[in-house]
Amino acid sequence: MPGLSTNQIATRVFSNGQQTQIVSISEDLTCEEVLKRLHLIPPQSNLVVIGGASKMTPESLLRLSSVFEQVIAPIAQRLQLSVLDGGTDAGVIQMMGRSRRAISGSFRLVGVAPRSKVRLPGEEDRPEFESRKDLEANHTDFCLVPGDRWGSESPWLARLASVLAGSKPSVTLLINGGQIALEDLMANLETGRPAVVLSGSGRLADAITDAIHQRSSETEPAVSEVVNAYYPDKLSLFDLASPLGDLTDLLEHMLANG
C-alpha cells in the first residue's frame, strides 16, 4: 500500500468498511490549511473528547459506555457537531468511535495523533510498525501531526478545534485520563474553550475533582495550577453517578450558548 504524501489528503478503508480521509501534515502547515484539506469549513460547533480509561472498575466502564451511546454520540448527531479526539483504538477514544457506529451516526469524527506513533489501515502486518497504536476504525478523518512522542498532538488538537469553531461554541470533555490528558486539557483551556470534567471516571478526572473539593493534601502541582487558573469560570464538574439526562442538558446548553 502506498505511503502518505505530506500535506496531501489520502483515502483509506478499515476492515469494517469505514472509509476515512487522512492527512499527514508538516510543522509549517496552518490549522486553516489542515481543515481545508479535510473539507471542514469553519465556523462549526464542535466537541473535543480527551482522556483514557485505565484503572476503571467494570461498573464504571459500563456506565461510561452508556455516557457515549446515550449522551455524547446522540448530541453530536442531533447538533451535527464535529468531534475531535486522539484517534487511537483504546479507552474513551475507542468508545467514541464505537458509539458513533452504534447509533449509525453521520457526524464527523476527527482523530489527531502523532504520525510516528500510529499505524494506518494496511500497516498492521508490517514489523516496523508493530509497536505503534492502531487508529480507531470508526473515525471519518485523521490529522497526523509531526512529533516523536505522545503529547505532540496536544497543541494541534486544541488549535484545530478552536479554528474550526470560529465564533461557534466548542466544549472539551475530560474523562479519566493521565499525563497526556493533562497536557490536552491545559492546551484546550488555554484557547479559552470551557471544559467539563467527568467526576467518578477515575485518575486525572478524579484528581481534579478532589483538588476542587480540597479532599487531598497531595495534589499534583500541575493539577492545582489548572484548578486555580480555570475553576469555576472555564472548568466545571459533572458527576458520573448523576442522571445522564443532566449531562445532556449541560452539554446542549454549553454548545447552544457558548
Image (cartoon, rainbow, N blue to C red):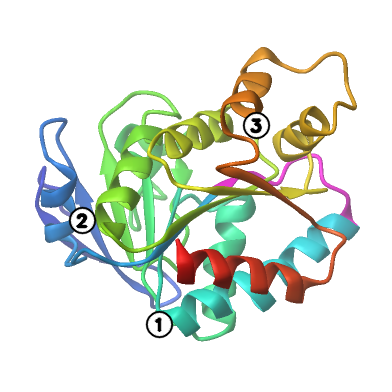
Q: Is residue 49 visible?
A: yes
> Which residue occupies 13% across, 41% down?
30
Q: Earlier in the sequence, mark 1 or mark 2?
A: 2
- Disc 1 designates what residue? 106
Q: Amino acid at mark 1?
A: Ser
Which quadrant is home to the C terminus?
bottom left
Span highlighted in magenta in the image: 50-58
Numbered disc in front, either 3 or 2: 3
Does residue 151 sit above or below 197 in this rendering?
above
Instruction: Give the residue type at disc 2.
Output: Met
Q: Which mark is residue 1?
A: 2
Quadrant in which the N terminus is drawn = bottom left
Instruction: Find the distance from the CA under tag 3 to the CA under tag 2.
Output: 35 Å
Identify which residue, 81 or 93, lies in the foreground: 81
Q: Name the residue tied to disc 3.
A: 178
Label 1 SS: loop
Q: Which comes sooner in the sequence, label 3 or label 2? A: 2
- Going by the numbered disc 3, the residue's amino acid type is Gly
Residue 221's place in the image compared with 74, above or below, is above
